Image: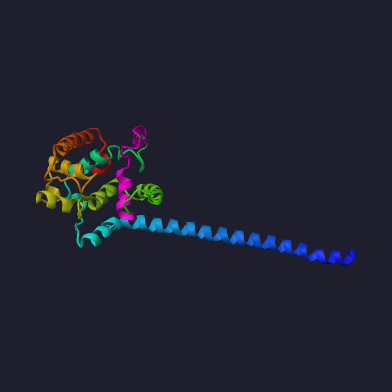
């Protein structure tokens, strides 16, 4: 009887070994698929950023959604050489004065925003470019996580000059008006290469709220904001903080 019981227990030991082997095999398969997913994600990110380092992005998710909502949008690409240099300096002064000095995230601005209780924005131009080109608008953790992943990659693959060029061509200046070429014609009836310092400052001043502000019909607040941006644009030119996109 004891011998028969031992024989009955023996297959159970083999069964446990089989289960352990299967578990180890499943773990290896899972790790293999995770690695494949990571490599695929890296490849997609590399391809997406590498492509737009050379080619001009035709549209973005938000731009496309606005086109579907409105029926049509105003957007025409223009190279940075065809834009008045003061326009680039104005958006940097207005949105990201330390643009030439950071790697995609302005830690000092983030700390200031936290100290201010979250009422201030700390998004850099690089982060906004990532959002405008690759992602959607909105405040959710998924988008923020993707933005945090993509921004350093964009900063590594693209030059600062390229980042500014794409930003100026993809940002919204009024409802359905995207890019500085469309904005210059829409507000002032001129090309982007003809923008004066004041006109460039007015365009930069509408960027936080393009659907609520107008560069051609500025409020007192917007005029004061534009004057401040004009001073800031002159300052970053004088102290070298515009060198990374003007050289």
Does 241 appear in magenta?
no
Magenta stretch, overall SS: helix
Give percent across and percent down for residue 129.
Answer: 30, 49
Name the residue furthest front: 1
Q: Judge left or right: residue 11 versus residue 50.
A: right
Residue 146 shows up from this direction: yes
Residue in front for this viewpoint, 234 or 129: 129
Residue 247 shows up from this direction: no
Picture quadrant of residue 104 = top left
Residue drawn 84% across and 66% down? 7
Give percent across and percent down for residue 27.
Answer: 61, 59
Of the 4 image quadrants, the one containing the N terminus is: bottom right
> How many numbered circles does the render carry?
0
Picture quadrant of residue 2 = bottom right
Does 128 appear in magenta?
yes
Give percent across and percent down for residue 176.
Answer: 20, 55
Residue drawn 26% across and 39% down? 243
Residue in front for this viewpoint, 167 or 187: 187
Of the 4 image quadrants, the one containing the C terminus is: top left
Residue drawn 38% across and 48% down? 144
Give percent across and percent down for residue 219.
Answer: 14, 40
What's drawn in magenta, residue-wise? 109-135
Q: Judge left or right: residue 232 versus residue 115.
A: left
Does 185 sit above or below residue 242? below
Q: Judge left or right: residue 36 versus residue 135.
A: right
Residue drawn 20% across and 53% down? 175
Residue in front for this viewpoint, 233 or 162: 233
């Amino acid at each position: 009887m004891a011998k028969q019981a031992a024989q009955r227990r023996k297959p159970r030991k083999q069964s446990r070994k089989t289960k352990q082997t299967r578990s180890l095999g499943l773990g290896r398969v899972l790790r293999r698929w995770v690695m494949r997913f990571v490599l695929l994600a890296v490849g997609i990110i590399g391809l997406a950023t590498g492509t737009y380092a050379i080619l001009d992005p035709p549209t973005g998710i938000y731009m496309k959604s606005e086109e579907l909502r409105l029926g049509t949008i105003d957007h025409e690409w223009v190279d940075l050489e065809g834009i008045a240099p003061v326009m680039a300096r104005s958006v940097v002064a207005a949105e990201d004065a330390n643009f030439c000095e950071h790697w995609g995230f302005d830690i000092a601005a983030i700390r200031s925003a936290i100290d201010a209780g979250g009422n201030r924005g700390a998004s850099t131009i690089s982060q906004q470019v990532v959002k405008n080109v690759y992602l959607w608008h909105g405040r959710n953790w998924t988008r923020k996580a993707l933005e945090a992943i993509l921004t350093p990659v964009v900063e590594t693959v693209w030059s600062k000059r390229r980042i500014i060029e794409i930003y100026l061509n993809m940002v919204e200046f009024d409802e359905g008006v995207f890019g500085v070429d469309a904005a210059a014609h829409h507000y002032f009836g001129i090309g982007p290469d003809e923008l004066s310092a004041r006109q460039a400052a007015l365009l930069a001043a509408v960027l936080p709220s393009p659907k609520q502000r107008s560069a051609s019909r500025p409020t007192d607040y917007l005029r004061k904001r534009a004057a401040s941006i004009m001073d800031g644009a002159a300052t970053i030119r004088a102290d070298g903080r515009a060198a990374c996109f003007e050289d």
